Amino acid sequence: MAQTYDIVAATGCPTGIAHTFMAKEALEKAAAARGLSIKVETHGQVGVENALTPGEIAAARAVVVAADKDVQAERFAGKPMVSVGVAKAIAVEAAGKLIDEALVAQADPNAVVQAEPDAAPEKETLGHQLYKHLMNGVSHMLVFVVAGGVLTALSFLWGITSFDSTAADYNSFAAMLKIIGGIAMGLMVPVLSAYIAESIGKRPALVPGFVAGMIAVQGLPVSAQTGLIDAGGTGVGFGFLGGIVGGFLAGYVIVLLEKLFAKIPASLNGLKAIFLYPLCSTAIVGLVMLGISGPMASINQAMMDFLQGLSTSGPIVLGLAIGCMCAFDMGGPVNKAAYATGTFLLGTALEAGVGTATYEFGTNFMAAVSAACIVPPLITTFAVIVGKKYFSQEDHDAGIVNFILGCTHITEGAIPFMTKNIWPVMPIMMLGSSIASILTIFFGVHDPAPHGGFLVLPVVDGGLMWVVSIAIGSVVGGLLFVLFKRHEYGKANGGTPASEPANAPAVTPATPADDPEASGGFVKASDVLCIDASDRDAALHAITDHAVESGIATDATALFDAFMAREAEGTTGMVDGFAIPHAKTDAVVRPAVVVLKSACDVSGWDTLDGAPVTCAIALLVPSAKAGTEHLQILSKVATALADDEFRATCKTTADPASIAALINARLA
């Protein structure tokens, strides 16, 4: 009998290099923590791996889709599902929340559900749909850019004009490499357009998508003699932007045609697929694309002029913009926008040829983008080596691995470090990347290869200064990161400076109140409050006041604010009358769980199933222990709430000691 799984999932990111597999690992860890079996299908650059079968999908309790590209989500119609961008599933805690939401989601045979962490499932937003379609095109395009760009760059090893048979440095092999690379780069826009269209209209949209991309490359041909439209004439292409417009146009034309042809008998489906769709869609899309070629060419030129105008403002303005974009979300939408722009400008540069102003600007821009993408992982490597004692062993090992990732232009390795402390780690990463970009532009480095990191150093013009620029950005960022971790380390050790001698006075042993075993369990009967609360805020005030009175926390206001900050990110209301509010703050002295049971309904607490809250299991954690006790206890509580027997027993039990024992049994 085939194996079945509680959860099935699909992950995919535009480049298919890091996010895809980080999300897979996080989902698997989160499922294991909940005692659930899971199978994750990945959509990477090598294709679909660990593919889900129809039987596995049918047998699963719920589905999680974490992807910024098309993963054929229509396969999951009728199953409880959540669908988010891949970046929202790369942390174990976030992945766990997605699994929890998927398990309580309502099956909808006609739609895919989209959910924010801790939010009730809702329809997938238009913005996410458009981004997913765009990234499907970008993910297919990137491999053509990389192959074409690197081959073209390799041809320059024999000389800048080695592809020219009239030049003194001509080499026939270099010329062949240049030809192959040029063909691959020439397919960049058609592939982008075709796979944007395919994401929207599926396979029938590929034909008009490719045609739209080719028109974007060549523009509207006009005769030089007559000034009239002429198939033998020449046109002005409108490139990257035209490919995007053409892709969306082709995809939605297919959607429209599907509706128009819906009444055609099913027996003629073959005729629709092989004749009506390609003929009608290609004619419509082609005419529209040719009709807008003039305005699109103007817009395309205006964008080029704007970007080149930034360079005239000096390397600081342009480098700061590139660095901040690349390090802002490290492989997310903003990073991809900067990288896609760089590849577009590089394609234009290689087409213009060595020695032109377009070539100089495009390859310099690409070098700055690559430098900005390489720096964040190297910042973590420098930090874990110089400040080793401030990092956990897990972080230290990840930082060492990031040296390889950074050197090969894989930015995503720095994401786990940033997600733990977005402030100030994100600004530190942005500063380091900006320094590298600014120096790269200032030193006039030119990179004719769009990916590969230091592997493409042989073809980089100014390679030594490029490495120096990246090293400076990495060291500055790394030092700032170490200073932050040193400060954090000091706070975690009671304000004692991290540099204090090793023979400093030992920490006072835990009292029975702090020792779960000495007190009979993590949750104490005295921390179970059987009181009525009118609304969510009143319940949280009761919990915070009790925490201060019992010595769990020192500041009720700060603790309440931490609870409310968490609620602002997304409700902690669960199902069947339960909520699991949690607060991470320095006001908490020791990790604790406080339970509030109310005989009356607690209003104002949005829950996943709409039921009013009657039992809140609150988790209180010191900031220094967030990510350890916090995640472990939260995952066990969430798993317990998925158990019907646990919920029923907790709801019917009124004795605080019995409730504490019930929860302690689950936390063991």
Image: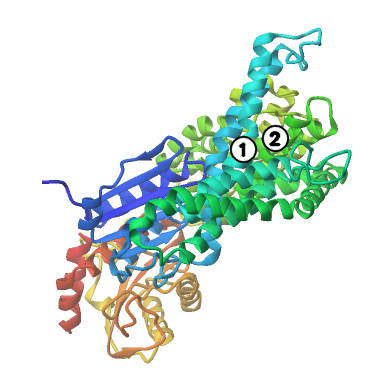
Question: Is 612 placed left or right of 665 in the picture?
Answer: right
| Image position of 146 with respect to 119: above or below | above
Q: Which residue is mark 1?
A: 188
CA separation in Å, label 1 and label 2: 8 Å
> Front-most of 264 and 397?
264
Image point (71%, 11%), residue name = 158
The residue under label 2 is which amino acid type?
A: Gly
The residue closer to the viewer here, 277 or 660, is 277
Helix, strand or loop at disc 2? Answer: helix
Image location of residue 532, percent across then percent down: 31, 91
Q: Which label's residue is closer to the chain start, 1 or 2? A: 1
Q: Position of residue 61 (x, y in %)?
A: 23, 61
Q: Is residue 180 left or right of residue 200?
A: right
Instruction: Say if residue 570 shows up in the picture.
Output: yes
Mark 1: secondary structure? helix
Residue named by callout 2? 347
In terms of depth relative to the viewer, which is nearer, 359 or 516?
359
Q: Amino acid at mark 1?
A: Met
Mark 1 near mark 2, Cβ–Cβ under 8 Å?
yes
Q: How is the image coloured?
A: rainbow
Say which residue appears at 30% left-offset and 60% top-offset: 635
Q: Quadrant of residue 366?
A: top right
Q: x, y percentage for residue 662?
A: 17, 71
Horizontal side of 272 relative to 300 (left or right) equals left
Q: How many labels sit on residues?
A: 2
- Identity of the residue furthest to the left in this view: 1
Can you say which quadrant of the picture contains the C terminus?
bottom left
User: For this rendering, which residue is in front, 371 or 563?
Assistant: 371
Instruction: Point out the frontmost of discs 1 and 2.
Output: 1
